[in-house]
Image (spheres, grey):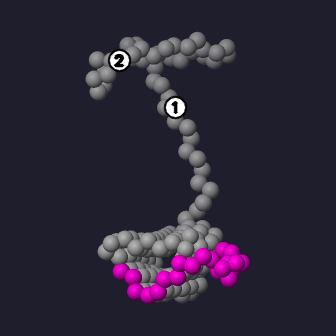
């Protein structure tokens, strides 16, 4: 009987290919089998993390996902996603592909796809996005505009 109550099976041995030395065997032990995992795909997107003890004042722009765990004051204009962690605070006008708020944003939010306020999220400012999600427990004070994007709207920051 093998591990977890399953019947133990003997591994099928294959003949070694020509030019390959036979594997050394320890007496009484089956040969170790290499894991048959496919290599993990390389990430094509990068992420900028603003740590919990970091304060950034000024304009932030870029083409990567941003995670705010610290404090940002100024403007934030990115072409990817913005996530404000539970301990994150943003006092800025924000433009991004999508915005997820678990912390606090004070300022207007413009998203190409959606704004998502989690239960711990607080947003004081106006929202302009085609989709707005507000989870029970979240706080929102402001106006929301869910009208379709204007022609020539393009990426955030280009209007």
Where 16 sits versus 54, above or below? above
List x then y, in percent, for residue 116: 45, 71
Q: Residues within 10 Å of mark 1 (few under 14, many from 20)?
A: few
Q: Is residue 141 inside the magenta stretch?
A: yes
Q: Is residue 125 inside the magenta stretch?
A: no
Kind of element beneath mark 1: loop
> Relative to 44, is 1 on the left or the right?
left
Kind of element beneath mark 2: loop
Main secondary-structure element of the magenta-colored stretch: loop
Numbered tag placed on residue 36 in the rendering: 1
Q: CA distance from mark 2 to mark 1?
A: 19 Å
Which tag, 2 or 1, sits closer to the chain's start?
2
Residue 96 visible: no
List x then y, in percent, for residue 87: 37, 75
The quarter of the image holding the N terminus is top left
Residue 138 visible: yes
The total number of labels drawn is 2
Circle 2 is placed at which residue position? 8
> Relative to 152, is 4 on the left or the right?
left
Range covered by the magenta-colored residues = 139-159
List x then y, in percent, for residue 59: 59, 84
Q: Residue 22's image quarter?
A: top right
């Amino acid at each position: 009987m093998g591990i977890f109550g399953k019947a133990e099976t003997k591994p099928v041995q294959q003949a070694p290919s020509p030019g390959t030395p036979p594997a050394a065997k320890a007496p009484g032990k089956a040969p170790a089998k290499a894991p048959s995992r496919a290599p993990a795909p390389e990430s094509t997107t990068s992420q900028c993390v603003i740590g919990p003890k970091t304060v950034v004042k000024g304009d932030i722009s870029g083409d990567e996902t941003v995670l705010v765990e610290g404090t940002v004051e100024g403007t934030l204009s990115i072409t990817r996603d913005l996530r404000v962690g539970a301990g994150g605070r943003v006092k800025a006008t924000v433009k991004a592909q999508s915005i997820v708020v678990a912390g606090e944003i004070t300022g207007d939010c413009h998203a190409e796809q959606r704004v998502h306020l989690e239960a711990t999220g607080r947003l004081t400012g106006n929202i302009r996005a085609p989709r707005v999600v507000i989870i029970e427990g979240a706080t929102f004070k402001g106006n929301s505009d869910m009208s379709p994007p204007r022609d020539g709207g393009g990426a955030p920051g280009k209007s």
